[in-house]
Structure formats: C-alpha cells, structure tokens
Image (cartoon, coloured by chain):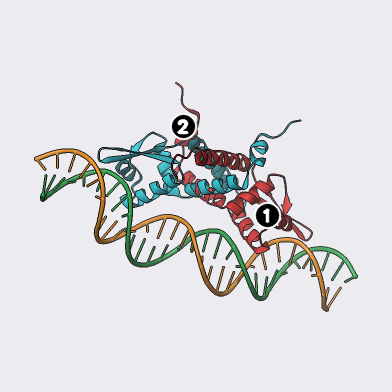
Chain colours: A red, B cyan, C green, D orange
Amino acid sequence: METPLANNLITQATPAGLQAAAFVAKALADENRLRIILSLTQGKKSVSRIVEELGISQPLASHHLKELKRALLVSVERSGPFIYYELADPRVMTILADLNGLATDLLTNRTAF
Amino acid sequence: METPLANNLITQATPAGLQAAAFVAKALADENRLRIILSLTQGKKSVSRIVEELGISQPLASHHLKELKRALLVSVERSGPFIYYELADPRVMTILADLNGLATDLLTNRTAF
DNA sequence: CAAACATATAAACATTTATTTATGCGATAT
DNA sequence: ATATCGCATAAATAAATGTTTATATGTTTG
C-alpha cells in the first residue's frame, strides 16, 4: 500500500511536536535571521563578521543571534575575544532552501495583486 | 567538483527571495496555523470542520485562515454556504514535516535546560 | 420575507517582537 | 592598571500579532 511521502512524516506529528515546530518556525520568521542563517551556511562566523556582512547594528545582530540560539538553531563557541556562531544542524539549510523555493514560486505564480 | 545539495539551492537566494521566505515562515510561525495546515493535509475542508477539529473559536480560525491565504499557502473555494480551504502547494506538507522533524530532534538532543 | 446557518469582519485588548541608544562586561595588549 | 576591542545586556519605544466578544455579510430554506 503506497502512501505519499510527506504524509507519513506528517501524520505522526504530535501536539508537542507541532509546538516545537512552531517555535522553530518563529525563529525563521524574520528576514534578518534568515540572512544570518544564510551567511552561516558558509561556515562558522564571529558576530562582528556577521554585522559587517549584513550591515546591521551590533546589538541587533546580538539580539537575533540570541533568538536563533534560543531556538537551538545555532551553537556558540568562544575563541579569544571573538564569539563564533555556527549552524547547529545542516537541515536548517535545506529548510531555508525549501522555504525560499516555495515562497519564490508562490509569489511568482500569483494571479491577483 | 562536488557541492553539498542545500548549498546550491541556498546560495542563489536573492534579497527578495529571503524576504518572501521570511513572509512564508511567519505564516508558519503559529501553532494553530500549523494545526490547520496539518489538518488540511487530509484534504479540502470547510471552516466549521476545522473549527470543530481544532477546538478553537470560529473567528480565530477565520483569522488564521486569512493569514494562511495572505501568505498564499492555502486556496479558497466557496460551495453553497460553505467555504473550503485547501493547501495551495504540496511542498507546504514537506516543509511542515521537515520543520517538525528538526524541531523534535533539536529539543530531544538538548543538553542543558 | 424571515429565520437559520456558515463565515467574515470590527473593535478592543494584552503580548510579543524588532529596533535603537546607551551601558556593562570579558578578553587582550600596552 | 588602563585603554581598547568584541560582544552582551538594559531600557525605551514603536509596531505587529493572537485572542475574545460582538456584529455584519452572504446563503439556504420555509
């Protein structure tokens, strides 16, 4: 008996799982945080590096990094005066890619404005 | 020359794409909306059906459906007095599944509380 | 037309969230 | 020890968001 791919994965979603999923989605629901994640796709980076790459203020970067850390999407590591952030799980990349792909298509194929 | 899967998809993310992705992520950043999406995984459903399945108030359901529609994640169709909502794209399911999988793992493998 | 039902909308409210400006704190070097 | 650099935190503010209660709109049926 054949079942669609996503259905299997999805039907076993528990209430706690959905809550967790919403929590992670919230962490992804900000353009600056997505830009940070995209930047971290290239590897571990210091806060100052992120700040200059994104062109946002240092406290703002710190705040968003804190949110990403809170959602366990990034891990932190201190080295001397620098603090390095990196993606905690490679799946974050694929989710961002999927999100980007879907969003782009949806907005493109839009019929009415 | 070999490149990781997600990297290819992700590095071509444009500013507009990221903005769109954040917009879609916002639509996913609510537990009730994820529950609605999960419910719509089973197919087209009326508002009243969703209301009784999720156990939330009718205006609240309407509000969240409006948000999902705004993000183009669902499509609407009227049939008599009923209004049916359905997922606009099957990829929404896989993203929810991935989100759920990642979130569950992240919270499980958590070291410190 | 009136009544009943399905859904949307409005108003009101409490929370949350993004951002800025200012300050604190740890690490390094002189 | 003090000055400097990298980063976090605090306070303040504006804007966005989730939820409830009440009301309006559209559809069907008698």
Task: Return the mark for residue A54.
Answer: 1
Is residue A87 among what the camera can see?
A: no
Which chain letter goes with mark 1? A
Picture coordinates of residue B51, whole percent (x, y): 32, 45
Label 1 crowding class (10 Å Cα cut-off): few <14, some 14-19, many 20+?
Answer: some
Q: Is residue B8 visible?
A: yes
Position of C25 compared to B61: left or right?
A: right
Q: Quadrant of the N terminus of chain A?
A: top left
Alpha-carbon span between mark 1 and mark 2: 38 Å
Instruction: State the count of labels.
Output: 2
Which of marks 2 and 1 precedes in the sequence?
2
Please report the residue visible at 64 percent of the width from the left and 37 percent of the height from the top. B9
Give the residue displayed 63% in from the left and 61% down from the top.
A60
Q: Position of residue A100 (x, y in %)?
A: 57, 42
Figure check: D7 above or below B82: below
Numbered mark located on residue B40 in the image: none
Quarter of the image where the C terminus of chain A is located: top left
Instruction: Determine the residue positioned at 45% across, 48% down.
Output: B31
- The answer to whether B4 appears left or right of B53 in the picture is right
Q: A55 or A64, which is in the foreground? A: A55
Q: Chain of mark 2?
A: A
Please, what secondary structure does the residue beneath circle 1 have?
Answer: helix
- Answer whether labels 1 and 2 touch (C-beta < 8 Å): no
At label 1, which amino acid type do we have? Leu
Task: Work out which residue is located at the far top of the displayed protein and give it.
Answer: A1
Residue closest to the eye, B45 or A24: B45
Residue C30 location, x and y as percent? 90, 70
Q: Which residue is mark 2?
A: A7
